[in-house]
Image: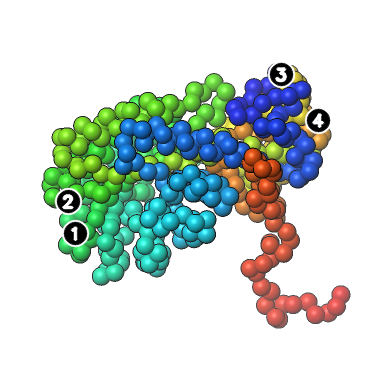
Amino acid sequence: MNQVIFPPFTSRDNRLFLEDHDLCELCDLHGTPLLVTSEKRLRENYRRIYNAFSSLYSRFEIRYAIKSNSNPAVISILRDEGSGVDVSSINELNIARYCGVPVEKILFSPNNASRDELLEALKNGVAVNFDDIGQLNILGDKHPETASFRINLNIEKGEFPGTTTAGPNAKFGMPESYAAEAYRQAREIGVRKFGIHVMIGSNVLSPDHFEHVAGEIFNAAGRISRETGIKFDFIDLGGGFGVPYRPEEKELNVDTVASSVINSLEKANAQYGLGNPKLLIEPGRYISADTTVLLGRVNNIKSYTKTFVGTDIGMNIMLRTALYGAYHHIVLANDLSRALSGPKEIVGQICENTDRIAKEREFPEARIDDIIAVFTSGSYVSSMSSNYNGRTRAREILLSDDGIHVVRERDKFEDFVRNTKIPDHLLDNSGK
Ligand code: LLP
C-alpha cells in the first residue's frame, strides 16, 4: 500500500474497505458521487467524547451541532445514544423533532433570527442561545422563561478566517462588557433561568485552547453572576473540537480536554459559588467528520498545462476545499498500491475554476473509471452541498450491523423543478 489511509478504513488487496464492505463495489452498486457512513464509528465518537466529560462531571450533556450533518439517520443514531442537538434554524429544529429528539434536549443557537423564528422555537419549548440582547428584545412581552446569551470572548481561533466565530471581526455574540446589563434587562422583563454560551471557532486540535476558552467563560460567568446576582442554570462551551484531516495531524485527546475543562469549572465553582451549573458542549465535526468517506469516479484526465484529474465530485458536493482552501486527504480506492507520481489538480464538473478538491497534490497516476475516496467527509459536506449547475447531490448510505441502508436518495429531475412555476402566459401550448 503506497497511499496513506485514515481509520476506521482498511485496505484489503489494496482496495479501500469500511468494515467488511469493499467501497468500490458499493460505487458500482450505488453510483457516484456516494457518501458512505459508518454507524459504528458515529456511536464510538459520541461515546468517546461523552464519557470523557461525564465521567468527571455528572451534570454534563451533549448538543450535537446538526449543521455539520443533518441527515435524519445520523441524528436518529445520536438520539438513540442519548444526545441532544444544537440547531441553527427552524428547519433544523423540525428535523430534530422529526427524529424524536425531546424538546428539552434541543438548543436553538441562531444568528440574526427573525421574531417569528424565535417565537416558533419558544412555542416548541426549546431553549434559545440569544446572540445578543437585541434578539431577546424583539420578542417584547413574549419573552421566554429561560434565556442564554452568546458571549464574544476576545479570542480569535479557528482553522480558517471563515470558520473563526469570535473576536473583534466576528458577527456573533456580544462582548462580556455588555453582558451584565443584558442579563439584568432579561431578569427585569421576567426571564427566570439563565445560560451562557460561547463558540470560538471550528476544527481546533490543541487541548490548551479548550482549557483557555473554558477558563475565560467560567470566569466571565462568575463575574456576571457576582455583579447581577443571577445564577447560571447552564454553561455552554459550544463546539470546535477538531479532527485530523492530514495524515501528519494528531487527533485531539478529549480526555485531556475534559480533565482541564472540569478542573477549571470546579475552580470557578469554588471561587464564585456558581452552584454546579449544567455543562453543555455542541460538537459537530468531532462526532461525525471521520465516520464518512466521499467516493467519486474519474471521468477524464488532461495534461496540457498541469495534470487535471477530472472527477464527478464538484464543489456542489464538496464545497469546503473551494470555500476555505480546506485540505481533505484523497486516495485511489481501487488501487492503494499505486505510487504517488507528482502534483495534480483534482477537480470536479462545475463551471468554476475554483472547483477543485485538491491543488498541486502529490497523487498517483489516475486512469479513467478509477474511484477516488475523499476522507473526513461526514461533517460540512452533505450539509453544505447544493444543486449548482443542475448537478445532483451525492447519494448517502449508512453501514450498520444489520446491513446497508440508503439514507439519502439522489434528487430526480422533478426535484429540480418541484418548487418552481412557469406563469400561464409563458407556457408553451404550441404542441411543438
Ligand atoms: N455550535 C455553534 C453555535 C456553531 O456555530 C458551530 C459551528 C458548532 C456548534 C459546531 O462546531 P464544530 O464542533 O463542528 O466545529 N462549515 C465550516 C464549519 C463552520 C462551523 C460554524 N459553526 C467547515 O466546513 O469547516
Question: Which label sits on residue 367?
Answer: 4
Classify the position of ligand 1 by quadrant: top left, top right, bottom left or bottom right: top left
Mark 4 burial class by Cα count in 10 Å: few <14, some 14-19, many 20+: some
Mark 4 or mark 3: whose residue is earlier in sequence: 3
Question: In the displayed structure, does residue 264 sit left or right of residue 28?
Answer: left
Which marked residue is nearer to the observer: mark 4 or mark 2?
2
Give the residue at x 69% y 38%: 295
Q: Amino acid at mark 3?
A: Met
The quadrant holding residue 153 is top left
Where in the figure is residue 32, as x and y percent of width and height?
74, 43
Cα–Cα gap, marks 2 and 3: 60 Å
Q: Disc 4 on helix, strand or loop?
A: loop
For the residues bearing labels 1 and 2, Cβ distance under 8 angstroms? yes
Q: Is residue 75 visible?
A: yes
The residue under the point 64% across, 50% down is: 407
Image disc number at residue 1: 3
Which of these two is toward me, 235 or 248?
Answer: 235
